[in-house]
């Protein structure tokens, strides 16, 4: 939790940005796992954390802009709550810690919103909040989702995208745990070790150092599956282990790194060649990222590095610009270069990717591969992003493209098919855009070169 003044200032800025009406920020409630009393670990809504700072369930914040009043809606603990879960300071005292004076019971929420036409809320992503809004507005739940406030959404995105000095400290803290998670994964990347054991140990570290992992760990020898959550494999010599993992620190800020390690710490010549192309794409992206540059162009340059690197190996052919315009590199990297990072690992994705990553100037591309770029807009100081190029050999995608002659002028399919059992390599770092360039969010960069990773595995 930050100082009270931080939350007061954020809410003041939000009030100026929205301009008029009533803003409603719903916190999250508990969510049941397999029966009502057995709940998932509670996770507060990120925008509620950002503006209100309280991480207990079943709260709502109301900002009446026209009358310059704000309220926290929630209920005090009952004696049963205290017996089973322990005591807390009163809700009024907790509200005072973040600069909110007026507290009302949650049941009074409807009284604070006399005119639904002036209500600003964000699109609900949990059914509980969707039903609360449905009741407040006397509209069907599906209708509620379509009538969220664009001006509130854009105001939140504008503020949360630019990370303050306090936030960068939190992101670096999450990165320290993420760093340790990956170092342990590298050291455990030995023949005969189960993927499940490694995933379990690094997720346990995230719990011991913060609140949780920032997303379900991706750890697999089958790195060609981009978000592979199956950990049933036993590490085998000659294979690669892709580990995409991060932590969420005690103040809910996220880290997100990926490294791909040769089992046993020794890469084959073929693995080295692909790894070094991905590394070049990563390094060039970091060198290129600075204020005024669009991330869409940084993504395109990563595609250029990948296409030209694979051409040297005989896997691609033809003119680079024509291949880029046709989307040929997407066969090997069918995802975007990166995404915003903050209180969410895909920051504010619940508000809408196109609000977060695009704007009136920079529109999302419709071409396969390019269309998966989550963040394409012009970079500004304070943006925090991931840089995560990769090369993957996805048998089903290769088969489809060859059969349908997709980009046949740029792909040597006979050579590509020699890599069908390769898997995939992704290398991901977290960066912050500075006044004239960018830097890593963390002080130390995870081992990333072949030599560095081999040394980390063998130490």
Image (cartoon, grey):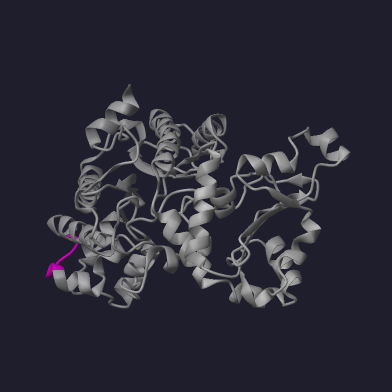
Task: Report x, y in % for residue 297.
Answer: 23, 63
**Residue 231 in sight from this viewpoint:** no
Q: Residue at x 65, y 42 (%)?
A: 96
Magenta run includes residue 317: yes
**Relative horizontal placement of residue 245, taking residue 65 as reference (left or right):** left
The quadrant the C terminus occupies is top left
Task: Report x, y in % for residue 431.
Answer: 32, 46
Magenta run includes residue 255: no
Query: Which residue appears farthest toward the right when viewing the image?
Result: 79
**Relative horizontal placement of residue 31, taking residue 187 as reference (left or right):** right
The quadrant the N terminus occupies is top right
Task: Report x, y in % for residue 54.
Answer: 63, 44
Q: Quadrant of residue 272?
A: top left
Q: Quadrant of residue 293?
A: bottom left
State whether residue 119 is above or below residue 431.
Answer: below
**Segment colored magenta:** 314-320
Query: Which residue appears farthest toward the top when viewing the image?
Result: 459
Q: Main secondary structure of the magenta part?
A: loop
**Relative horizontal placement of residue 146, taking residue 115 as reference (left or right):** left
Nearer to the camera, 136 or 365? 136
Task: Report x, y in % for residue 283.
Answer: 21, 46
Q: Residue at x 32, y 78 (%)?
A: 404
């Amino acid at each position: 939790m930050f100082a009270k003044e931080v939350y007061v200032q954020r809410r003041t800025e939000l009030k100026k940005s929205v301009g008029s009406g009533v803003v409603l920020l719903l916190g999250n409630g508990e969510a049941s796992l397999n029966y009502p009393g057995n709940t998932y670990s509670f996770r507060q809504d990120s925008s509620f954390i950002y503006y209100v700072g309280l991480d207990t369930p079943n709260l709502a914040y109301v900002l009446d802009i026209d009358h310059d009043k704000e309220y926290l809606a929630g209920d005090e603990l009952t004696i049963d709550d205290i017996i089973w879960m322990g005591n807390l300071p009163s809700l009024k005292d907790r509200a005072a810690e973040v600069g909110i004076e007026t507290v009302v019971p949650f049941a009074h929420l409807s009284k604070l919103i006399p005119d639904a036409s002036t209500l600003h809320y964000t699109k609900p992503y949990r059914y509980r909040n969707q039903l609360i809004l449905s009741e407040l507005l006397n509209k069907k739940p599906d209708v509620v989702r379509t009538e969220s406030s664009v001006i509130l959404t854009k105001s939140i995105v504008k503020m949360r995208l630019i990370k303050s000095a306090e936030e960068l400290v939190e992101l670096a803290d999450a990165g320290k745990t993420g760093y340790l998670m990956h170092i342990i994964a590298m050291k455990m990347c030995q023949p005969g070790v189960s993927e499940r054991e490694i995933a379990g140990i690094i997720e346990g570290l995230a719990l011991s150092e913060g609140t949780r992992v920032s997303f379900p760990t991706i750890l697999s020898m089958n790195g060609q599956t981009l978000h592979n959550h199956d950990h049933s494999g036993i590490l085998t010599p000659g294979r690669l282990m892709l580990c995409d993992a991060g932590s969420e620190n005690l103040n809910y800020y996220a880290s997100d790194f990926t490294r791909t390690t040769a089992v046993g710490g020794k890469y084959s010549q073929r693995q080295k060649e692909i790894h070094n192309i991905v590394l070049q794409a990563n390094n060039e992206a970091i060198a290129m990222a600075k204020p005024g540059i669009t991330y869409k162009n940084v993504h395109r340059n990563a595609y250029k590095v990948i296409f030209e690197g694979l051409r040297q190996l005989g896997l691609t052919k033809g003119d680079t610009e024509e291949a880029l315009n046709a989307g040929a590199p997407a066969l090997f990297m069918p995802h975007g270069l990166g995404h915003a990072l903050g209180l969410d690992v895909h920051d504010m994705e619940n508000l809408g990717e196109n609000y977060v990553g695009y704007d009136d100037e920079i529109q999302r591309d419709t071409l396969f591969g390019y269309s998966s770029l989550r963040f394409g807009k012009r970079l500004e100081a304070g943006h925090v992003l991931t840089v995560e190029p990769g090369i993957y050999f996805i048998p089903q995608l290769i088969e489809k493209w060859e059969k349908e002659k997709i980009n046949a002028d740029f792909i040597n399919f006979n050579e590509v098919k020699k890599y069908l059992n390769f898997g995939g390599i992704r290398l991901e770092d977290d960066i912050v855009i500075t006044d004239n360039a960018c830097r890593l969010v963390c002080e130390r960069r995870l081992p990333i070169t072949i030599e560095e990773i081999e040394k980390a595995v063998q130490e």
